[in-house]
Amino acid sequence: MNGRHLRPVTDELALHYSPLVRAAIHTMRYIETYGPIGLTPAKALKRYFVEWAAEAFVWPHYTAADLHAVNKVLNEQDFLPLVMLHDLMISTRLTRYYKGAMALAKQGRDLVDEPARLWHLLTTAFLWRTDHGRTMRRHDQFDGDWELILGVIDREAHEGASDDRIYAAILGMSEEQARRDHLLTASLYTHVLRPLTYAGLLAEVRTGTGIGMRHIYWKTPLWHAALRLPTDEPLSHIVRVFR
C-alpha cells in the first residue's frame, strides 16, 4: 500500500486531528517570521527552537510539561516527534539546510497555505517511506500488508479498541498471547500505530502507568475523510509481518 490509497481530503477541519501537519505548519510559519532555525554541528535543531516547539506544538504526550518532567533542558533528541518531523521536512523538501541553519524551501512556501496537499505529502512519506525501525533498540524491517492491516484496524477501532486487541486481530492470536510477545507488539506500535496516530488517522488515549499502561485507539474523522479501503473484500489475518 502507498499514497495512492489516500483520497484527497476536502474536509479541512479533519486535518486538525493531525499533530504532524499542525507541527509542520507551525515550523514553517516560525521560519517565515523569525528566519532559518539554527543547527548544532550535528545538524540538530538548536535548543531555543526545541523549547519553542514544545510549547507551540502541544503534541499529545509530548507537551512542554511532559518533556520538562524528565529533562531540565530540551535538546532535539529529547522530543521524538520533533526528530521525526525534522527528518521528514528535509526529505520531502519542505525545508533545506543553508549556512548552518534549516531554511524554508520552495515547496514549503508553496504548501504552507495548502494543508490538505501538505498532509498528503507528509503522510505518504511518513507511513510508507520512513524507516521507523531506527527508533528501536532492535532495528527491524516492516514487512506487513498495509491494506490488510488498515482493514483490521478499520473494523476493530470503530468504537475504540485497546492496543492488545488490535495486535491480536492483526496477528491472528489471543490478546493474552499478544501481551506476551513484547518484541512483536513493540514493533507493531512503532511501525503502525504510532505513525497512524502522528498522522492523525487514529486518536490515542493512555490509561494506567508503567508496565500496566494501556493504549486505546479510535478512528478520527480524518480516517474516514482520507482513506480509501477495500471494505467490500473479506479480511484475512496477516501471518508474516516482520523479518
Image (cartoon, rainbow, N blue to C red):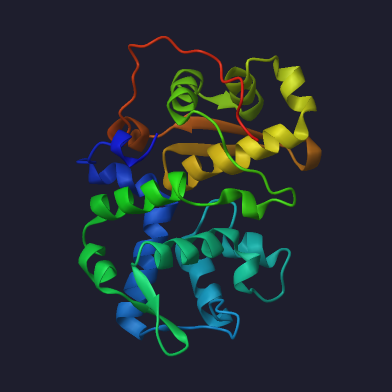
Is residue 227 in sight in this rendering? yes
Across and down, in percent, residue 175 comes to 70, 18
Query: Taking 59 as reference, is 74 above or below it?
Result: below
Instruction: Tell me the quadrant of the picture where the N terminus can be found.
Output: top left
Is residue 206 in sight in this rendering? no
Across and down, in percent, residue 133 comes to 62, 49
- Tell me: 134 left or right of 70: left
User: Which residue is located at x 33 percent, y 32 percent?
Assistant: 227
User: Which residue is located at x 56 percent, y 34 percent?
Assistant: 143
57 or 147, which is in the foreground?
147
205 or 230, which is in the foreground?
230
Query: Taking 167 as reference, is 12 above or below it?
Result: below
Across and down, in percent, residue 16 comes to 34, 48
Instruction: Tell me the quadrant of the picture where the C terminus can be found.
Output: top right
Seen as rendered, the residue at the extreme front is 243
User: Which residue is located at x 58 percent, y 39 percent?
Assistant: 142
Across and down, in percent, residue 30 comes to 37, 76
**In the figure, residue 2 lies in which quadrant?**
top left
Q: Count the numbered circles shown.
A: 0
Query: Taking 43 as reference, is 79 above or below it?
Result: above
**In the figure, residue 48 lies in which quadrant?**
bottom right
User: Which residue is located at x 67 percent, y 67 percent?
Assistant: 68
- Tell me: 130 left or right of 105: right
